[in-house]
Amino acid sequence: MEIKNEAILVLDFGGQYCQLIARRVREQNVFCEIKSYKTPVEEIIKCDYKGIIFTGGSNSVYTEDAPKCDKALLESGIPILGICYGAQTLAHSLGGTVSSSEVKEYGNTSVDFNNTSMIFGNVKPRGVCWMSHTDYISKVPDGFKITAKSTDCPVAAMENVAKKLYAVQFHPEVQHTEDGNKIIRNFVYKVCGCSGDWQMSSFVTTTINDLKEKIGDKKVLCGLSGGVDSSVAAVLVHKAIGKNLTCIFVDHGMLRKDEGDEVERVFKQQFDMNLIRVNAEERFLSKLAGVSDPEKKRKIIGEEFIRVFEEEAKKIGRVDYLCQGTIYPDVVESGVGEAAVIKSHHNVGGLPDDVDFKGIVEPLRDLFKDEVRRAGLELGIPEFLVWRQPFPGPGLAIRVMGDITPEKLEILKDADAIFREEIRLAGLDRSINQYFAVLTGIKSVGVMGDGRTYDNTIALRGVTTSDFMTADWARIPYDLLAKISSRIINEVKCVNRIVYDITSKPPATIEWE
């Protein structure tokens, strides 16, 4: 998709919240993209951005190998907002001084704001902000004035209105900063003059028209996993070219309970797609027999997925394009501004050797996950699929600890289905960002009826998160956990113990393998 008439650039200096900044801008209905700080100034100016945001970063600006911004960018007249390291590099480049702090600031910090500043106009005079820095701006550049401060940070914000340069030492993009969204909105609308024409309805219409023009009467092949990304991508292409799209759905047998049937029903019946379902459970399980190492499981599933996809693709005949559910985080993580690496274990693990494609169609490569869901709803995809829980490509293979058997998969599918059903019935399915069951591989002694048992332990995992880079364990009510535990013990064979994982990320990961 081409850059819109109005767009904000996030210039990445290595900050962990880079994608989060872009998402916050898009929440203001303004298109935004991410590029590396190494991007030539000429290329940036040519794109005619309405404004630029410098991200945070882990370096000290005064070290020799620290990421630097080209001074020509600061003199281009494009409004700039520097955040944390971005603020420091702006100050350093313009003759200010950045020093090591005697008192480091991490976490929630009270900040006093000058409300005459354009970016703090409707912000509370004193508010809590998220700080994360070891250096600070000890002397502002000529022409700048200080617009915010904290007890230990004399320059929590500064600005040069004439040059449209603004800087904040804290992170307005994170939820912990009370009026963070207001600050970003003020910069985007008041300083940059954006009007907010980035709407999901217009994205869907424009994308379908663009796909019609690009593909014409050519044939497209899509590896449909049943996940949100590949599903929305497939429906967009289907709306554009109809029966010229063929979807291959490889059911490796490690999907959640009834998921394969749901996918087939939605795409064949509701959307009348050309869908080929390959029931390959026995094939995958035979390859995985006796394998316990999680990385080996992933590689086997990824490799076998490619082989199955190749075989089915050859049967179809000539195909011109391959459709993928690549989304913007995939593009960013595989190298900002570079071609996206195909997502292993999700859509297609690699390009089939014997199928000659003219090109790849990636209609979602500009969207974040929450935007993909909104696009799915615009397209009429059922809510249960659009809001489907995040699911790893290898599926339940990495939620069964140890080797995989049909019996173990059956136990986990049934337990997981009960957990997800009760969370949904309790109305918590949108507030808990990811939740699932794990077959731990641990057996323990129990008593059921008048007999002694020695059966499986199921672990339940639920987390809350905004970006999946960090996560906190979800505080599911005890009464609900008790109900879930009781149902699993009573309804699922060979399970006699339920535990709940109360570990955050970090130190743990969200998945167990």
Image: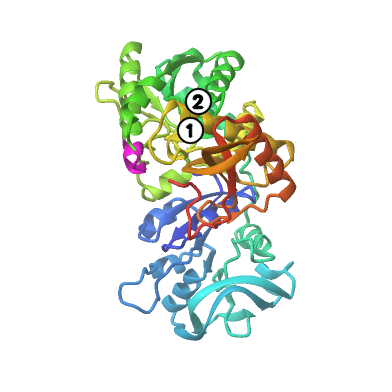
- Circle 2: element type: helix
Find residue 375 and report its horizontal and vertical position in percent: 60, 34
Q: How is the image coloured?
A: rainbow
Q: Residue at x 67, y 34 (%)?
A: 421
Q: Is residue 222 left or right of residue 232?
A: left
Residue in the foreground of this view, choosing between 364 and 478: 478
Residue 141 visible somewhere in the drawing: no
| Mark number, residue 94 | none
Q: Residue at x 51, y 71 (%)?
A: 84
Residue 32 lies, with reference to residue 321, above or below; the image says: below
Q: Label 1 belongs to which residue?
A: 363
Find residue 34 and report its horizontal and vertical position in percent: 46, 53
Mark 2 nearby-residue class (10 Å; few <14, some 14–19, many ≥20):
many
Part of the protein shown in magenta: 292-299
Q: Label 2 belongs to which residue?
A: 234
Q: Is residue 206 left or right of residue 349?
A: right
Residue 343 visible somewhere in the drawing: yes
Q: Is residue 46 left or right of residue 474?
A: left
Amino acid on which disc 1 is placed: Pro
> Considering only order in the chain, which callout, 1 or 2, is on the residue closer to the N terminus?
2
Q: Is residue 297 magenta?
A: yes
- Circle 1: element type: loop
Mark 1 nearby-residue class (10 Å; few <14, some 14–19, many ≥20):
many
Q: Residue at x 37, y 30 (%)?
A: 348
Find residue 90 and report its horizontal and vertical position in percent: 47, 73
Q: Is residue 344 magenta?
A: no
Q: Residue at x 55, y 57 (%)?
A: 503
Residue in the foreground of this view, choosing between 363 and 474: 474
Q: Is residue 249 left or right of residue 66?
A: right
Residue 347 lies, with reference to residue 133, above or below; the image says: above
Specify the principal SS of the magenta part. helix
Alpha carbon distance from label 2 to label 1: 9 Å
